[in-house]
Image (cartoon, rainbow, N blue to C red):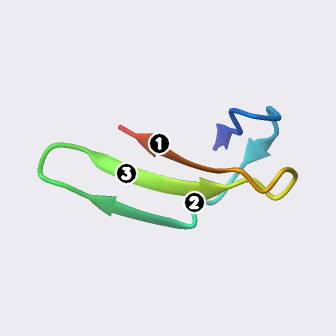
Amino acid sequence: MTKCPKCGKDVAEPDKSFVNKVFSVEAYTCKECETSFKVTG
């Protein structure tokens, strides 16, 4: 679970995710403010 960078609400499930050779990327969309953002790890 991660927080939306715009409104601070918790976003539980990523819209999509993939793993690269170096890192993983998860794309989220906040249901409260409709902001799309990505989290790398």
Q: Taking 20 as reference, is 24 left or right?
A: right
Q: Secondary structure at mark 2?
A: loop
Q: Taking 40 as reference, is 2 left or right?
A: right
Provide residue 16's location: percent of width, then percent of height: 48, 67
Name the residue carrying label 3: 25
Q: Which mark is residue 24?
A: none
Q: CA distance from mark 2 to mark 1?
A: 9 Å
Provide residue 18's location: percent of width, then percent of height: 33, 62
Q: CA distance from mark 3 to mark 1?
A: 6 Å
In this rendering, is residue 3 above or below 16?
A: above
* Residue for point 84% across, 50% down: 33
Name the residue carrying label 2: 14
Labels 2 and 1 touching (C-beta < 8 A): yes
- Mark nearer the N terminus (3 vs 2): 2
Quadrant location of the N terminus in the rendered image:
top right
Labels 3 and 1 touching (C-beta < 8 A): yes
Provide residue 19's location: percent of width, then percent of height: 26, 58
| Residue type highlighted by circle 1 | Val
Q: Which mark is residue 39?
A: 1
